Image (spheres, rainbow, N blue to C red):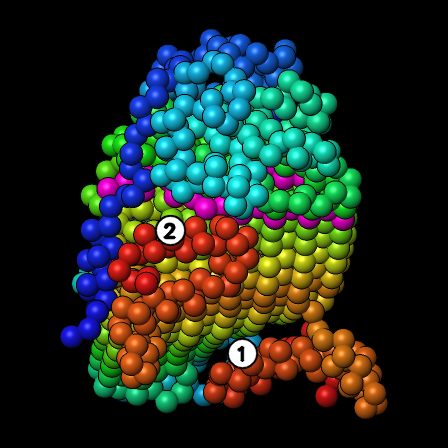
Amino acid sequence: MGYTENELAKDLENQEYKFGFVTNIESDKAPKGLNEGIIRFISAKKEEPEWMLDFRLKAFVLWKEMTEPEWAHVHYEKPHFQDITYYSAPKQSKKYESWDDVDPEMKETMAKLGISMEEQQRLTGVAVDFVMDSVSVATSFKSKLAELGIIFCSFSEAVKDHPELVRKYMGSVVPVTDNFYAALNSAVFTDGSFCYIPKGVRCPMELSTYFRINEGGTGQFERTLVVADQGAYVSYLEGCTAPQRDENQLHAAVVELIALDDAEIKYSTVQNWYPGDKEGKGGIYNFVTKRGVCERNAKIAWTQVETGSAVTWKYPSCVLKGDNSIGEFYSVAVTNNYQQADTGTKMIHLGKNTKSTIISKGISAGKSQNSYRGLVQIHKSADNARNFSQCDSLLMTDECGAHTFPYIECKNSSAKIEHEATTSKIGEDQIFYCLQRGISEEKAISLIVNGYCKEVLNQLPMEFAVEAQKLLAISLEGSVG
Amino acid sequence: MSETQTDRTLSSFTKHLRQTEISLPAHLITTSLNELNGKSFPTTRSEAWKYTRLTKLSKLSPTLASKQDGTNGTPFAIHSTGNFLVLENGAIHLDASRFETVTGLTIKRFSECNAEELQHIGSLLTLENEPFNALNTAYLQEGIFIQIADKVQIEAPIELIHLLSKVECSATIRLYIHVGKFAKAEMTIGTWAAGADKSILNAVTEIHVGEGAHFTLQKLQCEDEGNFQICTEEITQDKDSVFTMHTVTLNGTLVRNNVRVRVNGTNCETNLYGAYLLKGNQHTDNHTVIDHMMPHCNSNELYKGVIDEQATAVFNGKVFVRKDAQKINAFQSNGNVLMTDTAAVNSKPELEIYADDVKCSHGSTTGQLDEEAVFYLQSRGISERSARNLLVEAFIGEVLDKNDNQDFVAKTNAILNERFGWER
């Protein structure tokens, strides 16, 4: 008897989290809880200017007035905001002079994550901004990028060194009042990445940030701001992992992308936060606000591979403000055991001849719930707007769920919108066909799942595609060869 | 303080209405009154009413209007034979109706029903957070009980018309239809207005389709612009049954259709078809739920609309597949054509699936008439207007072709010819 779906289901259930190690680095922590004092503490720690502190405090006042959203198709115990440590920095105040100065244990962490700096520096030419628990510890290739006028640094450095750019763009895409978690992030964010590509510059390498939650009971609140000036191009990669911890940790990030006229931003994410164990205990709450704005002829492409987190609540969006601008969203979301994902995108068409494409692939296994929630909004001014959406769901067991909630709003008669969604399991006829050709059942399932995700994986940059495939293999081990 | 939507409580809407005199189960009345007490109309902040504003409706304080003598229902009739019931402003008009004795068919008013028969009424209707259902229970004016005996086939469709004929009046009507085992029947419901304005029809239809039975419901919604209509259809299907529904919406300021089908048996078939052709300031909102509770069932859903002038349309279709309801094939499709830039459409096709061995899909499109097709027809000597009408007819035709009731289709086309000036 070959490899059956029941066996596959069992394999999926027994899958343990492979990045569940804790790095023993002493960290510099703020006391638990959230109040104005903590925000002042964070701001002081980061040696921030007055305007930044004002921004935080204003956000905090607004946040206190807001209520947690409950519309998503997820059920979880709400985080206790007073039990979270809002600042946790690896305890090394000294800035590194060179790569060799970096704590060896931390280097090892990176190596385990498969992003060994040496290797990356030497072989791949990827510049990495590594964020561990809130503070950016090392940035490579900075000088090389500086030659081109590209600014790629941690958010706190940007606040100090490029306040004019930060002040101009921060909060312009995701305003403080946008939602509960965006407001929280605006009040307590600790670090993140900042990237500015000057006019007409094509960033020669893929920029990358690796996030990792290390300290127990901490929340990670990072902020990413990517600005591509007129005619610029950048491909930005973001990866996330967290060690195995019992309590539910909160991750509430804000990502803002600004593509000015004729610019292009490609933003790829591989998210592999700890999903909780197979009883559904622990895991990360991933509540992220990601949005980009496209000016004339600009293009933003979001690509995401979501395999981790206990609860995911994430909608990378594009505001297609300028005429002829393009928004794309490619997503693979895998949920296993008790994971819950409510993810999708928003495409807001404002400009003429704007185009958007949505390709979403969901895979549900175990007892998980996987939802696609998307909005396509065509405003009156968006003549000849075009949207194509495709949302497919694959069900691996009879205990999981796959759901689709698309919102399609059209106010312009010259717009063309297409949406299609399918939900099914791997066809027995497909497996039978493979078996008939001498392909084992396990290989057949792997083949089908790979083929199913291919449209999205093809969009990832080379280095990431390999990692994403590895992650898919880990998440669905036994099925992907 | 200015009066906004949220300030308008349901009690100010009901102040001229009378609580029901029909002896429905007491707990339903109590629950409904509790639901209405101190509550306001739902706003667009509520997910179920996200795209439909009730502001205009909430400003009304409708009165109860009685039927008028000498009302003639015939001009509104779709079928020339069979039972024909006229309900004017929520009251049954026996003189205008036509009753024929058909073996196995019982049609009576709720007031003529015994306690046991009344017990089934409202048993599956959601009252919590459904103010219109609560209104339809606590302020029910008239109820019609229709029973089709087991193994009976009713040849001529049973026809019922709702007629609004007074200004700012309220018609609150309930229908309960029980289709016996292996029975087969068809029903047509038309909604019309003559001299009415700012009037509201609140109709709830409960249908129980028994084992192996076939039941078809056709609705032609054709109130004049200025009137409101909130319709709820609550259907339960037993095993091996087939339920088909056609909803054609051609007029009305605000038309809301809530259709919920509980497929509570194996080997069932459910078909929901809808067509809406809107213009002026009309607004139509179709909410459908197909709840697959048992395995081995098929469902098809096709809704198509043409939205002209300043009209707006909403489609929200949900397919729900419960755990263990394996081997379900569910297809849902929604197509919209926007004729002007002032028209708008909001479409929300949803799938919620908890079983794995299923094939479910949905599709939604929004666009305009193909300019090349218009040009092709013009180059063959057809005027632009006729060309557009022809293409609209073809677009909607896909839905109307699913209907094999010739009388119904003919009436629909006649109204479309008149209303949209289709040349033949």
In the shown orientation, is residue B216 left or right of residue B5? Answer: left
**Secondary structure state at the residue bearing disc 1:** helix
Q: Quadrant of residue A469?
A: bottom left
Relative to B113, say whether A260 is above or below.
above
Q: Nearer the viewer, residue B116 or A268?
A: A268
Asked whether residue B43 appears in the rendered view, the answer is no
Q: Nearer the viewer, residue B163 or A347?
A: A347
Q: Chain of mark 2?
A: A
Say which of marks 2 and 1 sits in front. 2
Residue A189, percent from left and from top: 51, 24
The residue labelled by disc 1 is B399
Tag 1: residue type? Val
Q: Is residue B424 within the magenta segment?
A: no
**Label 1 crowding class (10 Å Cα cut-off): few <14, some 14-19, many 20+?**
many
Q: Chain of mark 1?
A: B
* Same chain? Circles 2 and 1: no
Tag 2: residue type? Leu
Q: Is residue A264 within the magenta segment?
A: yes
Residues at marks 2 and 1, CA–CA distance in whole angstroms: 46 Å
Residue A219, percent from left and from top: 40, 26
The image's mark for residue B337 is none
In the shown orientation, is residue B167 left or right of residue A341? Answer: right
Residue B9, percent from left and from top: 48, 37
Relative to B322, say whether B272 is above or below.
below
Relative to B40, say whether B252 is above or below.
below
Extent of the magenta region: A255-277
Q: Residue at x 41, y 31 (%)?
A: A107
The residue labelled by disc 2 is A471
Name the main secondary structure of what is drawn in magenta: strand
- Number of marks in picture: 2
